[in-house]
Image (spheres, grey):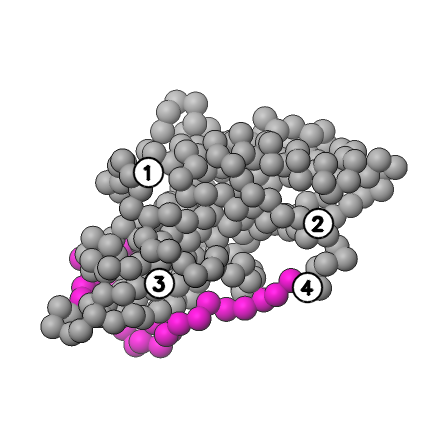
């Protein structure tokens, strides 16, 4: 990280006053490139995808001073040069609480400009207003549950050597799910909980090894987006599937959840943004 954009310089883990005046300078971008260099990703990305943010504590004042509330959904492209530290996003949204805005469309325009500037790429934003809250759907990730396996685990660092295939078995298409992904914040070491879905086409991946690998993130410190890219790259290199999709839905912190997905093949549709039971 550069001197001005290191995670330790962010608001994470520090007492922070909450501004009651709109302030886009609160957003704290960090370049993706540094962590991707660590993962050996350079040049053309070996995947495409999105980071899907849901912000549940969005509020502002209408022009008569009456509070308005909404849920904001952000679609951040994986090829954006930056991520934004999540506490700074919370502070940014809270800075709107006492700000008068001339309606949802004006708010969307403001959010698009500020967040696209911070991420360094065009960010799509949707507001779900209070009258539409009841239309939001819940659902769990589909797939064969890895957590059914009775395995012994004594290593809580991600070990790519655990990822193996049986080259003697015919290639197959499979979707696997685990609710046991836990990583820790890169700065505060606070726990981040997630469900993860892996879809692939290729030689069958050893499921016990995959479950042990995923549980290995339990003591690992990395941001959500970085964990998903690490899982993707380790599976791609160790198992060499012809098609690979990795998605994680993290539980919310500070009124925000972040749900990255990465794929190396075209999808028939965008992954559903359904809130699961733990979100």
**Front in this rendered view, residue 240 or 218:** 240
* Precedes in sequence: disc 3 or disc 4: 4
Residue shown at the point (34%, 64%) measured from the top left: 199
Look at discs 1 and 2 and give the one toward the viewer.
Answer: 2
Q: Are discs 4 and 2 less than 8 Å apart at CB?
A: no
Quarter in which the C terminus is drawn: bottom right
Residue depth check, mark 4 versus mark 1: number of the one nearer the observer: 4
Question: Is residue 256 visible from the viewing direction of this image?
Answer: no
Where is mark 3, residue-wise?
Answer: 198
Cα–Cα gap, marks 1 and 2: 33 Å
User: Considering only order in the chain, which callout, 3 or 1, is on the residue closer to the N terminus?
Assistant: 1
Say which residue appears at 78% left-offset and 45% top-offset: 68
Residue 135: mark = 4
- Earlier along the polypeptide chain: callout 2 or callout 3? 2
Q: Earlier in the sequence, mark 4 or mark 1?
A: 1
**109 versus 158 height, above or below:** above
Q: Which residues are magenta?
A: 136-165
**Label at residue 70:** 2
User: In what element is the residue under mark 3?
Assistant: strand
Report the Cα–Cα distance between label 2 and label 3. Answer: 31 Å
- In depth, the one of 113 and 196 nearer the eye is 113
Give the overall secondary structure of the magenta segment: loop
Q: Earlier in the sequence, mark 1 or mark 2?
A: 1
Mark whose residue sits in front, 4 or 2: 4
Check residue 137 for magenta coloring. Answer: yes
Q: Which mark is residue 35?
A: 1
Judged from the image, the secondary structure of the residue bearing numbered disc 4 is helix
């Amino acid at each position: 990280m550069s001197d001005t954009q290191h995670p330790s310089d962010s608001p994470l883990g520090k007492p922070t006053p909450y501004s009651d005046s709109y302030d886009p300078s609160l957003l704290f971008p960090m370049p993706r490139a540094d962590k991707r260099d660590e993962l050996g990703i350079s040049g053309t990305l070996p995947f495409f995808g999105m980071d899907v943010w849901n912000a549940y504590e969005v509020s502002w004042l209408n022009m008569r001073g009456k509070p308005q509330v909404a849920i904001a959904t952000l679609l951040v492209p994986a090829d954006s040069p930056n991520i934004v530290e999540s506490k700074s996003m919370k502070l940014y949204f809270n800075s709107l609480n006492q700000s008068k805005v001339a309606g949802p469309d004006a708010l969307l325009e403001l959010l698009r400009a500020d967040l696209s500037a911070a991420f360094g790429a065009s960010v799509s934003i949707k507001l779900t207003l209070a009258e539409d809250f009841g239309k939001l759907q819940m659902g769990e990730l589909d797939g064969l549950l890895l957590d059914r396996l009775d395995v012994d685990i004594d290593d809580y660092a991600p070990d790519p050597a655990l990822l193996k295939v049986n080259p003697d078995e015919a290639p197959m298409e499979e979707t696997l799910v685990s609710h046991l992904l836990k990583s820790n914040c890169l700065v505060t070491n606070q726990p981040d909980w997630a469900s993860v879905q892996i879809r692939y086409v290729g030689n069958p991946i050893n499921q016990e090894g995959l479950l042990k690998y995923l549980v290995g993130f339990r003591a690992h410190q990395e941001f959500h987006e970085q964990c998903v890219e690490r899982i993707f790259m380790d599976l791609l290199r160790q198992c060499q599937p012809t098609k690979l999709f990795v998605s994680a839905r993290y539980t919310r912190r500070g009124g925000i959840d972040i749900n990255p997905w990465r794929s190396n093949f075209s999808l028939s549709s965008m992954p559903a943004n359904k809130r699961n039971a733990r979100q």
